[in-house]
Amino acid sequence: MLRTLLNIIWLIFAGLGLFLGYMLAGIICCILIVTIPFGIASFRIAVYSLWPFGRAVVDRKQSGVGEVMSLVGNIIWVIVAGWWLALGHIVTAIPLFVSIIGIPMGWANLKLIPVSLMPLGKEIVESDAILPTYQRSA
């Protein structure tokens, strides 16, 4: 119930703008063919930024060439776009922390920083999916 309420407030004040921005970036990346992996990552972040409460970012299990390519792609991403996105999330989180109701949204904005810095090799899952079974029932 609380997650849904926070997600609705987030959607109105921050989520829709972030979603549209990440979607636009994803479309541009997909048009440029070579940057399609960045576009797919941008679409993944867009959906996460639309409804972040109750979800978490985890590392995708990879090995060999996939892991190396993700690392190289993430380095390129950080140089070109990642640090700008992280800075934007920090700047927009600060005013959210000013009000009591905005504190959870400020934390959600900060929670987006790691995935906006290095999106390749990440997966977005429901928070309950990463908890051990004995913690879910509590």
Image (cartoon, helix red, strand yellow):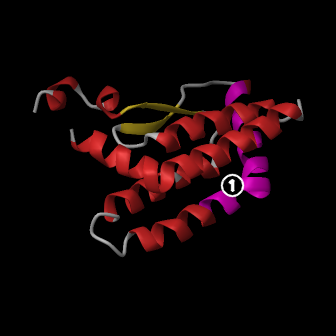
12 falls in the magenta region:
no
User: Is label 1 in a helix, a strand or a loop?
Assistant: helix
The answer to which quarter of the image holds residue 68 is top right
Magenta range is: 66-86
The answer to whether residue 134 is above or below residue 91 is: above
- Which residue in the protein does label 1 denote? 82
Name the image quarter holding the N terminus.
top left
Query: Which secondary structure dominates the residues rendered in magenta?
Result: helix
Across the whole image, how many numbered discs are drawn on residues? 1
Left or right side of 29 for 70: left
The answer to whether residue 87 is above or below residue 76 is: below
- Between 55 and 22, which is closer to the camera in this rendering? 22
Whole-percent x, y for residue 28 in the image = 82, 40
Whole-percent x, y for residue 14 in the image = 49, 55
Residue at 54% over, 25% down? 61
Does the rendering let one see residue 69? no
The answer to which quarter of the image holds residue 19 is top right
Left or right side of 95 for 37: right
Residue at 50% over, 39% down? 48
Q: Badge 1 local density, few (<14 within 10 Å), some, or many (20+)?
A: many
The answer to which quarter of the image holds residue 22 is top right
Name the image quarter holding the C terminus.
top left
What's under tag 1, amino acid-wise? Answer: Gly
